[in-house]
Image (tube, grey):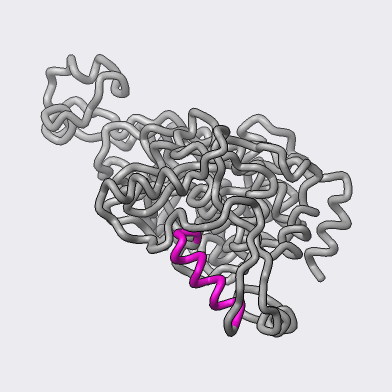
Amino acid sequence: MGLLGVPVSSATELRMQQNVEVYNPAGVRPDDVYVDQLLKKTMTQMGKTKPALAGEFPDGKIEKVKILKEAFSEINELYYNRGWTDGLPIVPPTVERVKEMLVGADLSSEYVVAVLDPMGGQATVEKIAVNAVMAGCTPAYMPILIAAVEAVARPEFDLRGVSTTTNPDIPMLIVSGPIVEELGINADTNTLGRGWKANATMGRALHLIIQNIGGSWPGITDMSTIGQPGDFSMMLAENQVASPWEPLHVGLGYPKSSNVVTVLSAEGTHNILGMGLKSEIFLRLVANHLAGLDRAYRSTILLIIATDTAAMLSRDGWDRKKIIEFVKANAVMPFSRYKELFIDSGRAHRHEVPPWVFETKDPHAMIPVPFIDHFLILVAGGTGEKSMLIPGWSAGRPVSKEIRTPSYWEELIQNSKQ
Protein backbone atom coordinates (compact mmCIF):
# COMPACT_ATOMS: atom_id res chain seq x y z
CA MET A 1 0.00 0.00 0.00
CA GLY A 2 1.15 3.50 -0.78
CA LEU A 3 0.40 6.88 0.81
CA LEU A 4 -3.06 7.13 2.43
CA GLY A 5 -4.03 3.63 1.39
CA VAL A 6 -3.37 3.96 -2.35
CA PRO A 7 -2.10 0.57 -3.60
CA VAL A 8 1.35 0.76 -5.15
CA SER A 9 0.06 -1.03 -8.24
CA SER A 10 -2.68 1.59 -8.61
CA ALA A 11 -0.16 4.39 -8.21
CA THR A 12 1.95 2.83 -11.00
CA GLU A 13 -1.14 2.51 -13.16
CA LEU A 14 -1.99 6.18 -12.60
CA ARG A 15 1.51 7.23 -13.67
CA MET A 16 1.09 5.38 -16.96
CA GLN A 17 -2.18 7.08 -17.88
CA GLN A 18 -2.38 10.33 -19.82
CA ASN A 19 -5.89 11.15 -18.63
CA VAL A 20 -7.49 10.23 -15.33
CA GLU A 21 -11.23 10.43 -14.72
CA VAL A 22 -12.00 11.82 -11.28
CA TYR A 23 -15.14 12.96 -9.51
CA ASN A 24 -15.92 16.52 -8.47
CA PRO A 25 -16.47 16.64 -4.67
CA ALA A 26 -18.07 20.11 -4.60
CA GLY A 27 -21.64 20.61 -3.52
CA VAL A 28 -24.41 21.59 -5.91
CA ARG A 29 -27.38 23.55 -4.59
CA PRO A 30 -30.99 22.70 -5.44
CA ASP A 31 -30.88 25.56 -8.00
CA ASP A 32 -28.00 23.73 -9.78
CA VAL A 33 -25.40 26.31 -8.70
CA TYR A 34 -22.09 25.00 -7.34
CA VAL A 35 -21.33 26.25 -3.86
CA ASP A 36 -17.84 27.06 -5.17
CA GLN A 37 -19.27 29.71 -7.47
CA LEU A 38 -20.81 31.52 -4.51
CA LEU A 39 -17.65 31.08 -2.48
CA LYS A 40 -15.57 32.51 -5.32
CA LYS A 41 -17.82 35.55 -5.41
CA THR A 42 -17.43 36.00 -1.65
CA MET A 43 -13.66 35.62 -1.96
CA THR A 44 -13.52 38.36 -4.59
CA GLN A 45 -15.56 40.69 -2.42
CA MET A 46 -13.25 40.00 0.52
CA GLY A 47 -10.12 40.55 -1.55
CA LYS A 48 -8.91 36.97 -0.91
CA THR A 49 -6.89 35.01 -3.46
CA LYS A 50 -6.76 31.57 -1.87
CA PRO A 51 -7.72 28.94 -3.00
CA ALA A 52 -5.96 29.99 -6.20
CA LEU A 53 -8.26 28.02 -8.53
CA ALA A 54 -11.54 28.43 -6.61
CA GLY A 55 -14.50 27.81 -8.86
CA GLU A 56 -12.34 26.93 -11.85
CA PHE A 57 -13.46 23.49 -13.00
CA PRO A 58 -15.62 22.04 -15.78
CA ASP A 59 -19.31 21.48 -15.18
CA GLY A 60 -20.31 17.88 -14.53
CA LYS A 61 -19.75 15.11 -12.02
CA ILE A 62 -16.69 13.61 -13.69
CA GLU A 63 -13.70 15.33 -15.19
CA LYS A 64 -10.81 14.05 -17.29
CA VAL A 65 -7.60 15.40 -15.84
CA LYS A 66 -4.62 15.40 -18.18
CA ILE A 67 -1.60 14.03 -16.38
CA LEU A 68 1.85 15.31 -17.29
CA LYS A 69 4.02 13.19 -15.01
CA GLU A 70 2.35 11.55 -12.00
CA ALA A 71 -1.36 11.44 -11.25
CA PHE A 72 -1.39 11.24 -7.46
CA SER A 73 0.62 14.41 -6.86
CA GLU A 74 -0.91 16.34 -9.75
CA ILE A 75 -4.50 15.60 -8.73
CA ASN A 76 -3.63 16.50 -5.15
CA GLU A 77 -2.17 19.81 -6.26
CA LEU A 78 -5.18 20.54 -8.45
CA TYR A 79 -7.69 19.74 -5.72
CA TYR A 80 -5.73 21.72 -3.14
CA ASN A 81 -5.73 24.80 -5.38
CA ARG A 82 -9.46 24.43 -5.91
CA GLY A 83 -10.08 24.39 -2.14
CA TRP A 84 -11.17 20.75 -2.03
CA THR A 85 -8.67 19.35 0.48
CA ASP A 86 -7.94 20.00 4.15
CA GLY A 87 -4.28 20.64 3.41
CA LEU A 88 -3.29 16.99 3.73
CA PRO A 89 -2.93 14.61 0.76
CA ILE A 90 -6.16 13.03 -0.43
CA VAL A 91 -6.87 9.78 -2.26
CA PRO A 92 -7.83 10.76 -5.85
CA PRO A 93 -11.57 10.02 -6.29
CA THR A 94 -11.29 8.06 -9.51
CA VAL A 95 -14.37 6.57 -11.14
CA GLU A 96 -13.34 3.09 -10.03
CA ARG A 97 -12.82 4.09 -6.40
CA VAL A 98 -16.09 6.00 -6.15
CA LYS A 99 -17.97 3.10 -7.74
CA GLU A 100 -16.48 0.78 -5.13
CA MET A 101 -17.34 3.18 -2.29
CA LEU A 102 -20.97 3.31 -3.41
CA VAL A 103 -21.26 -0.40 -2.68
CA GLY A 104 -21.37 0.61 0.98
CA ALA A 105 -24.84 2.14 0.57
CA ASP A 106 -27.96 0.48 -0.78
CA LEU A 107 -29.39 3.82 -1.85
CA SER A 108 -29.46 5.50 -5.24
CA SER A 109 -26.28 7.46 -5.89
CA GLU A 110 -28.45 10.51 -6.65
CA TYR A 111 -30.44 10.27 -3.43
CA VAL A 112 -30.14 13.52 -1.46
CA VAL A 113 -29.34 12.62 2.14
CA ALA A 114 -29.43 16.27 3.26
CA VAL A 115 -28.85 19.84 2.20
CA LEU A 116 -25.85 21.19 4.11
CA ASP A 117 -25.12 24.66 5.45
CA PRO A 118 -23.58 27.12 5.19
CA MET A 119 -23.95 27.35 1.38
CA GLY A 120 -26.74 24.81 0.82
CA GLY A 121 -25.00 22.06 -1.13
CA GLN A 122 -26.89 18.81 -1.65
CA ALA A 123 -25.22 15.86 0.05
CA THR A 124 -26.15 13.10 -2.37
CA VAL A 125 -24.98 9.56 -1.66
CA GLU A 126 -22.53 9.96 -4.54
CA LYS A 127 -21.05 13.22 -3.22
CA ILE A 128 -20.66 11.62 0.20
CA ALA A 129 -18.88 8.68 -1.44
CA VAL A 130 -16.52 10.99 -3.36
CA ASN A 131 -15.42 12.76 -0.18
CA ALA A 132 -15.18 9.42 1.66
CA VAL A 133 -12.75 8.18 -1.00
CA MET A 134 -10.69 11.36 -0.64
CA ALA A 135 -10.50 10.84 3.13
CA GLY A 136 -9.28 7.23 2.77
CA CYS A 137 -12.46 5.44 3.91
CA THR A 138 -13.60 1.95 3.01
CA PRO A 139 -17.12 1.17 1.68
CA ALA A 140 -18.22 -0.28 5.04
CA TYR A 141 -17.94 3.18 6.57
CA MET A 142 -20.67 4.62 4.34
CA PRO A 143 -23.63 3.80 6.64
CA ILE A 144 -22.00 5.74 9.49
CA LEU A 145 -21.20 8.71 7.24
CA ILE A 146 -24.74 8.84 5.86
CA ALA A 147 -26.18 8.82 9.39
CA ALA A 148 -23.68 11.51 10.46
CA VAL A 149 -24.66 13.73 7.51
CA GLU A 150 -28.32 13.34 8.47
CA ALA A 151 -27.42 14.34 12.04
CA VAL A 152 -25.45 17.50 11.25
CA ALA A 153 -28.20 18.67 8.90
CA ARG A 154 -30.77 18.73 11.69
CA PRO A 155 -31.72 22.31 12.68
CA GLU A 156 -30.94 21.69 16.34
CA PHE A 157 -27.32 20.88 15.50
CA ASP A 158 -26.91 24.38 13.99
CA LEU A 159 -24.41 23.49 11.27
CA ARG A 160 -24.57 27.04 9.93
CA GLY A 161 -23.38 28.37 13.27
CA VAL A 162 -20.78 25.66 13.81
CA SER A 163 -19.30 26.01 10.31
CA THR A 164 -19.10 29.82 10.25
CA THR A 165 -18.43 30.91 13.85
CA THR A 166 -15.25 32.54 15.10
CA ASN A 167 -15.32 29.92 17.89
CA PRO A 168 -13.14 26.79 17.46
CA ASP A 169 -16.14 24.45 17.27
CA ILE A 170 -16.03 21.37 15.06
CA PRO A 171 -18.29 18.34 14.44
CA MET A 172 -17.24 15.40 16.61
CA LEU A 173 -18.41 11.83 16.00
CA ILE A 174 -19.22 9.31 18.74
CA VAL A 175 -20.11 5.76 17.67
CA SER A 176 -21.74 3.22 19.96
CA GLY A 177 -23.15 -0.24 19.40
CA PRO A 178 -21.96 -3.57 17.94
CA ILE A 179 -20.68 -1.78 14.82
CA VAL A 180 -17.71 -0.49 16.85
CA GLU A 181 -16.23 -3.98 17.06
CA GLU A 182 -17.46 -5.03 13.62
CA LEU A 183 -15.55 -2.24 11.88
CA GLY A 184 -12.56 -2.15 14.19
CA ILE A 185 -13.28 1.38 15.40
CA ASN A 186 -10.86 2.18 18.20
CA ALA A 187 -12.62 2.63 21.54
CA ASP A 188 -9.55 1.71 23.59
CA THR A 189 -6.17 3.38 24.14
CA ASN A 190 -5.81 6.64 22.19
CA THR A 191 -9.39 6.42 20.92
CA LEU A 192 -9.43 10.14 20.15
CA GLY A 193 -5.91 10.12 18.75
CA ARG A 194 -3.96 8.80 15.80
CA GLY A 195 -3.26 5.29 14.60
CA TRP A 196 -6.64 3.85 13.57
CA LYS A 197 -7.94 4.05 10.04
CA ALA A 198 -11.62 3.91 10.93
CA ASN A 199 -11.46 6.76 13.46
CA ALA A 200 -9.16 8.95 11.39
CA THR A 201 -10.81 8.56 8.00
CA MET A 202 -14.47 8.76 9.02
CA GLY A 203 -13.88 11.85 11.11
CA ARG A 204 -11.93 13.37 8.24
CA ALA A 205 -14.60 12.43 5.70
CA LEU A 206 -17.33 14.25 7.62
CA HIS A 207 -15.20 17.39 7.74
CA LEU A 208 -14.46 17.20 4.01
CA ILE A 209 -18.18 16.70 3.35
CA ILE A 210 -19.04 19.83 5.30
CA GLN A 211 -16.22 21.75 3.62
CA ASN A 212 -16.77 20.65 0.04
CA ILE A 213 -20.49 19.96 -0.14
CA GLY A 214 -21.67 22.45 2.48
CA GLY A 215 -19.16 25.16 1.56
CA SER A 216 -17.42 25.79 4.89
CA TRP A 217 -14.14 27.25 3.66
CA PRO A 218 -11.47 28.50 6.09
CA GLY A 219 -11.21 32.28 5.99
CA ILE A 220 -14.16 32.60 3.60
CA THR A 221 -17.18 31.21 5.41
CA ASP A 222 -15.44 29.42 8.30
CA MET A 223 -14.21 32.34 10.40
CA SER A 224 -12.71 30.43 13.35
CA THR A 225 -10.28 32.84 14.99
CA ILE A 226 -7.63 30.26 15.91
CA GLY A 227 -9.19 26.92 14.97
CA GLN A 228 -8.21 23.60 16.48
CA PRO A 229 -6.56 20.32 15.38
CA GLY A 230 -9.88 18.49 15.62
CA ASP A 231 -10.86 20.30 12.44
CA PHE A 232 -8.99 17.58 10.51
CA SER A 233 -10.73 14.68 12.23
CA MET A 234 -12.42 14.08 15.58
CA MET A 235 -14.02 10.72 16.18
CA LEU A 236 -14.08 8.15 18.96
CA ALA A 237 -16.15 5.19 20.09
CA GLU A 238 -17.68 4.01 23.33
CA ASN A 239 -15.67 1.31 25.10
CA GLN A 240 -18.69 -0.77 25.99
CA VAL A 241 -16.56 -3.78 26.96
CA ALA A 242 -14.97 -1.80 29.79
CA SER A 243 -17.99 0.32 30.70
CA PRO A 244 -19.83 -0.58 33.91
CA TRP A 245 -22.99 1.19 32.75
CA GLU A 246 -25.55 0.78 29.99
CA PRO A 247 -24.43 1.86 26.51
CA LEU A 248 -24.61 5.54 25.68
CA HIS A 249 -27.18 4.95 22.95
CA VAL A 250 -29.48 3.07 25.35
CA GLY A 251 -29.53 6.13 27.59
CA LEU A 252 -30.45 8.15 24.50
CA GLY A 253 -33.49 5.95 23.90
CA TYR A 254 -32.23 3.33 21.42
CA PRO A 255 -32.34 -0.47 21.81
CA LYS A 256 -29.09 -2.06 23.00
CA SER A 257 -28.67 -3.91 19.69
CA SER A 258 -28.77 -0.65 17.72
CA ASN A 259 -25.81 1.11 16.16
CA VAL A 260 -25.90 4.85 16.77
CA VAL A 261 -23.76 7.81 15.80
CA THR A 262 -23.95 10.96 17.88
CA VAL A 263 -22.58 14.22 16.51
CA LEU A 264 -21.84 17.18 18.73
CA SER A 265 -20.04 20.44 18.12
CA ALA A 266 -16.90 20.15 20.21
CA GLU A 267 -15.10 23.27 21.34
CA GLY A 268 -11.94 21.79 22.80
CA THR A 269 -10.61 19.27 25.31
CA HIS A 270 -9.93 19.63 29.04
CA ASN A 271 -7.83 16.87 30.62
CA ILE A 272 -9.04 15.68 34.04
CA LEU A 273 -6.23 13.97 35.95
CA GLY A 274 -7.88 11.57 38.37
CA MET A 275 -4.79 9.64 39.41
CA GLY A 276 -4.96 8.62 43.07
CA LEU A 277 -8.26 10.39 43.70
CA LYS A 278 -11.26 8.86 45.40
CA SER A 279 -14.61 8.97 43.59
CA GLU A 280 -16.08 12.07 45.23
CA ILE A 281 -12.82 14.02 44.97
CA PHE A 282 -12.60 13.16 41.28
CA LEU A 283 -16.14 14.39 40.69
CA ARG A 284 -15.44 17.59 42.61
CA LEU A 285 -12.46 18.14 40.31
CA VAL A 286 -14.78 17.74 37.31
CA ALA A 287 -17.15 20.28 38.88
CA ASN A 288 -14.27 22.71 39.44
CA HIS A 289 -13.30 22.48 35.77
CA LEU A 290 -16.87 23.26 34.73
CA ALA A 291 -17.13 26.21 37.10
CA GLY A 292 -13.95 27.58 35.55
CA LEU A 293 -15.39 27.73 32.04
CA ASP A 294 -16.01 31.06 30.37
CA ARG A 295 -19.77 30.83 29.80
CA ALA A 296 -22.83 30.98 31.99
CA TYR A 297 -24.62 28.47 29.77
CA ARG A 298 -23.64 25.41 27.76
CA SER A 299 -26.09 23.44 25.69
CA THR A 300 -23.81 20.40 25.88
CA ILE A 301 -21.06 19.02 28.07
CA LEU A 302 -19.41 15.70 27.24
CA LEU A 303 -17.55 13.96 30.06
CA ILE A 304 -15.34 11.13 28.80
CA ILE A 305 -14.51 8.94 31.78
CA ALA A 306 -11.42 6.74 31.56
CA THR A 307 -12.14 3.05 32.02
CA ASP A 308 -10.21 2.68 35.30
CA THR A 309 -11.99 5.67 36.79
CA ALA A 310 -15.37 4.42 35.57
CA ALA A 311 -14.76 1.10 37.29
CA MET A 312 -13.91 2.89 40.56
CA LEU A 313 -17.00 5.08 40.36
CA SER A 314 -19.22 2.09 39.70
CA ARG A 315 -17.76 0.15 42.65
CA ASP A 316 -18.58 3.12 44.86
CA GLY A 317 -22.18 3.18 43.70
CA TRP A 318 -22.07 5.98 41.15
CA ASP A 319 -24.09 5.76 37.94
CA ARG A 320 -24.55 8.35 35.18
CA LYS A 321 -27.56 9.99 36.83
CA LYS A 322 -25.85 10.35 40.22
CA ILE A 323 -22.67 11.68 38.61
CA ILE A 324 -24.56 14.36 36.69
CA GLU A 325 -26.56 15.41 39.73
CA PHE A 326 -23.44 15.67 41.89
CA VAL A 327 -21.39 17.57 39.34
CA LYS A 328 -24.17 20.07 38.61
CA ALA A 329 -24.71 20.64 42.34
CA ASN A 330 -21.00 21.31 42.90
CA ALA A 331 -20.15 23.33 39.78
CA VAL A 332 -21.04 26.60 41.50
CA MET A 333 -19.58 29.96 42.48
CA PRO A 334 -20.63 32.80 44.84
CA PHE A 335 -23.10 35.26 43.35
CA SER A 336 -20.66 38.16 43.87
CA ARG A 337 -18.16 36.54 41.51
CA TYR A 338 -20.88 35.26 39.18
CA LYS A 339 -22.29 38.77 38.84
CA GLU A 340 -18.87 40.17 37.97
CA LEU A 341 -18.01 37.47 35.42
CA PHE A 342 -21.35 36.87 33.76
CA ILE A 343 -24.06 39.41 34.56
CA ASP A 344 -22.03 42.63 34.47
CA SER A 345 -20.18 41.44 31.37
CA GLY A 346 -23.43 40.53 29.58
CA ARG A 347 -22.53 36.84 29.23
CA ALA A 348 -25.52 35.64 31.26
CA HIS A 349 -28.37 35.84 28.75
CA ARG A 350 -31.92 35.92 30.07
CA HIS A 351 -33.12 33.35 27.54
CA GLU A 352 -30.51 30.87 28.82
CA VAL A 353 -30.14 31.57 32.55
CA PRO A 354 -33.12 31.18 34.98
CA PRO A 355 -34.75 34.49 36.08
CA TRP A 356 -34.04 33.81 39.76
CA VAL A 357 -30.32 34.25 39.12
CA PHE A 358 -30.79 37.89 38.14
CA GLU A 359 -32.99 38.47 41.19
CA THR A 360 -30.40 37.13 43.64
CA LYS A 361 -29.27 39.61 46.32
CA ASP A 362 -27.10 37.53 48.64
CA PRO A 363 -23.47 37.88 47.45
CA HIS A 364 -22.64 34.53 49.07
CA ALA A 365 -25.42 32.57 47.37
CA MET A 366 -23.99 29.76 45.25
CA ILE A 367 -24.93 29.90 41.57
CA PRO A 368 -24.61 26.94 39.16
CA VAL A 369 -22.16 27.55 36.35
CA PRO A 370 -22.58 26.70 33.62
CA PHE A 371 -26.25 25.85 33.27
CA ILE A 372 -26.31 22.72 31.08
CA ASP A 373 -29.04 21.27 28.88
CA HIS A 374 -27.33 18.08 27.71
CA PHE A 375 -24.77 16.36 29.94
CA LEU A 376 -23.38 13.26 28.18
CA ILE A 377 -21.16 10.72 29.92
CA LEU A 378 -19.10 8.36 27.78
CA VAL A 379 -16.72 5.61 28.87
CA ALA A 380 -13.84 5.41 26.41
CA GLY A 381 -10.11 4.88 26.17
CA GLY A 382 -7.66 2.41 27.63
CA THR A 383 -5.97 1.96 30.99
CA GLY A 384 -5.07 5.00 33.03
CA GLU A 385 -6.90 7.64 35.01
CA LYS A 386 -6.93 10.55 32.57
CA SER A 387 -10.50 11.58 31.78
CA MET A 388 -11.66 14.48 29.63
CA LEU A 389 -14.24 17.26 29.51
CA ILE A 390 -15.38 18.57 26.12
CA PRO A 391 -17.64 21.64 26.11
CA GLY A 392 -20.04 21.95 23.19
CA TRP A 393 -21.18 24.85 21.02
CA SER A 394 -23.67 26.83 23.08
CA ALA A 395 -26.13 27.44 20.25
CA GLY A 396 -26.35 23.86 18.98
CA ARG A 397 -27.45 20.52 20.35
CA PRO A 398 -25.99 17.02 20.02
CA VAL A 399 -27.90 14.90 17.52
CA SER A 400 -28.02 11.11 17.40
CA LYS A 401 -29.00 8.93 14.46
CA GLU A 402 -29.40 5.19 14.19
CA ILE A 403 -27.02 3.71 11.62
CA ARG A 404 -28.88 1.77 8.97
CA THR A 405 -26.80 -1.02 7.48
CA PRO A 406 -27.56 -2.68 4.11
CA SER A 407 -28.91 -6.23 3.83
CA TYR A 408 -25.49 -7.47 2.70
CA TRP A 409 -23.75 -6.00 5.76
CA GLU A 410 -21.87 -9.16 6.79
CA GLU A 411 -20.36 -9.49 3.32
CA LEU A 412 -19.43 -5.80 3.33
CA ILE A 413 -17.66 -6.18 6.68
CA GLN A 414 -15.69 -9.17 5.47
CA ASN A 415 -14.59 -7.35 2.31
CA SER A 416 -13.47 -4.36 4.36
CA LYS A 417 -11.13 -6.58 6.38
CA GLN A 418 -9.37 -8.05 3.35
Q: Looking at the picture, does residue 17 appear above or below residue 382?
A: below
Residue at image point 47% right, 57% down: 56
Question: In screen coordinates, is 118 left or right of 293?
Answer: right
* Front in this rendered view, residue 182 or 36: 36
* Residue range (magenta): 70-84
Q: Quadrant of the N terminus?
A: bottom right
Q: Looking at the picture, does residue 329 appear above or below residue 83?
A: above
Residue 177: x, y in percent? 71, 46
Residue at image point 49% right, 42% down: 264
* Front in this rendered view, residue 38 or 116: 38
Asked if residue 288 can be seen in this view, the reply is: no
Residue 260: x, y in percent? 67, 41
Residue 381: quadrant of the picture = bottom right
Residue at image point 49% right, 29% down: 156
Residue 332: x, y in percent? 27, 34
* Front in this rendered view, residue 393 or 22: 22
Question: In screen coordinates, is 38 left or right of 122?
Answer: left
How many numbered marks appear?
Answer: 0
